[in-house]
Amino acid sequence: MVERENEVLGKGPAFEFVESALAVNDRIRKLDPKDNELFDIVIVSRNHAQAAVRLINSINHYGLCLERITLAGGADPTTYLGAWKADLFLSPDEDDVRSAIKAGFPAAVVYKYNGEDLPNDQLRIVFDGDAVLFSDEAERVYQQRGFPAFVENERQKAGMPLDEGPLRKFASRIAAIQEKFHTKEVPCPIRTYILTARSGASAGKRAILTLREWGLKIDECTFNAGASKAAMLKAIKPHLFFDDSPSHIDAALEENIPAARVLYGIKDEKVEAKPAEKGKKRGRERLVESDGAKGTLKEHFPVKKTKS
């Protein structure tokens, strides 16, 4: 461990998202130097304290402003999410994500990203609708009773807002940061998207009216009507795409789109194993890999905002 501490860790699956979120912080400070409501990225890890030197060297190498770190020395890192007041927990370890969810924290599994470095001039976040921003109520109707029943359910309940999904509050916090820029009529360094498998004419109205009821502003919305999301994701080039469907996550990863699976709802109940490629598990890398001189910055990122 000590002999490798000057070797820089490679970029992990959440790197593009984290780097761009920190760039947003720089823009907020330029907008108002006294504003303390920022993205607060925390690294929590099962590694021992001695691993901190290599981690810190790597953080500084990439020019990341990451000051909050917990090295749990082999213990469950999700134990500290409450102390950090985390709004979102990202990890390549599905067991830790489930532990975070069980403790009441929104969480998602992130997967190995093999694409090119993304520009950090604008943080782009794509949310699925049902079972991500919204509850899985409508998804359950579709899965259990089929498409015609789903369409009829949405027609009858068009004016009835959907319940909140696991990432609704996180999306609201993102929108609050965006509002700082909109209020001062300056370009916003964040853009948000909904990319849903819902059809527009037959099932889109309830989704939009739900957002309106919540007062949640999303910049763009695409009703994909059941088609693959890969083409739209390639056009958007998000820093992170949140979805509950293993098939949509697989399609994103095949196109080298940074993706995070939200473990929630009926689709997660049907999945007994991680999304896999030819039966192989993905994304279990730790902070320090055992393959020679290679290491990765692939730890857990509880994301929260500080409040003034």
Image: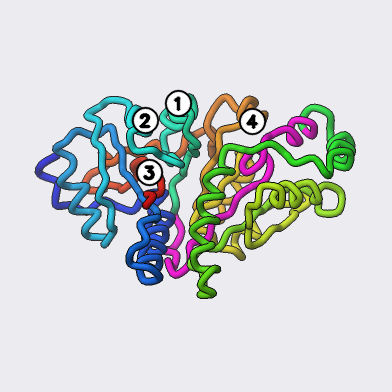
Question: Mark 3: which secondary structure?
Answer: strand
Which residue corresponds to the image point at 63% horizontal and 57% vertical from the top-left? 217
Q: Which residues are magenta?
A: 114-142
Q: Residue furthest left?
A: 3
Structural distance between the alpha carbons of marks 1 and 4: 16 Å
- Asked if residue 253 can be seen in this view, the reply is no
Q: Provide the residue designation for mark 1.
A: 103
Q: Is most of the magenta stretch helix, strand or loop?
A: loop
Q: Earlier in the sequence, mark 4 or mark 2?
A: 2
Contact flag, marks 1 and 2 (Cβ < 8 Å): yes
Per the image, the residue denoted by label 3 is: 301
Could you classify mark 3 by the number of other residues whose Cα lies within 10 Å: few (under 14), some (14-19), or many (20 or more)? Answer: many
To which residue does mark 4 refer? 265
Residue 205 seen in the current view = yes
Percent across and percent down for residue 198 are 76, 47
Between discs 1 and 3, the one toward the N terminus: 1
Along the polypeptide, which appears first: circle 1 or circle 4?
1
Q: In front here: 24 or 95?
A: 24
- Say if the magenta span includes residue 128: yes
Q: Nearer the viewer, residue 277 or 257?
A: 257
Left or right position of 221 against 298: right
Question: Disc 2 designates what residue?
Answer: 78
Q: Residue at x 63, y 25 (%)?
A: 269
Mark-to-mark CA distance, 2 and 3: 10 Å
Q: Mark 4 or 3 closer to N-term?
A: 4
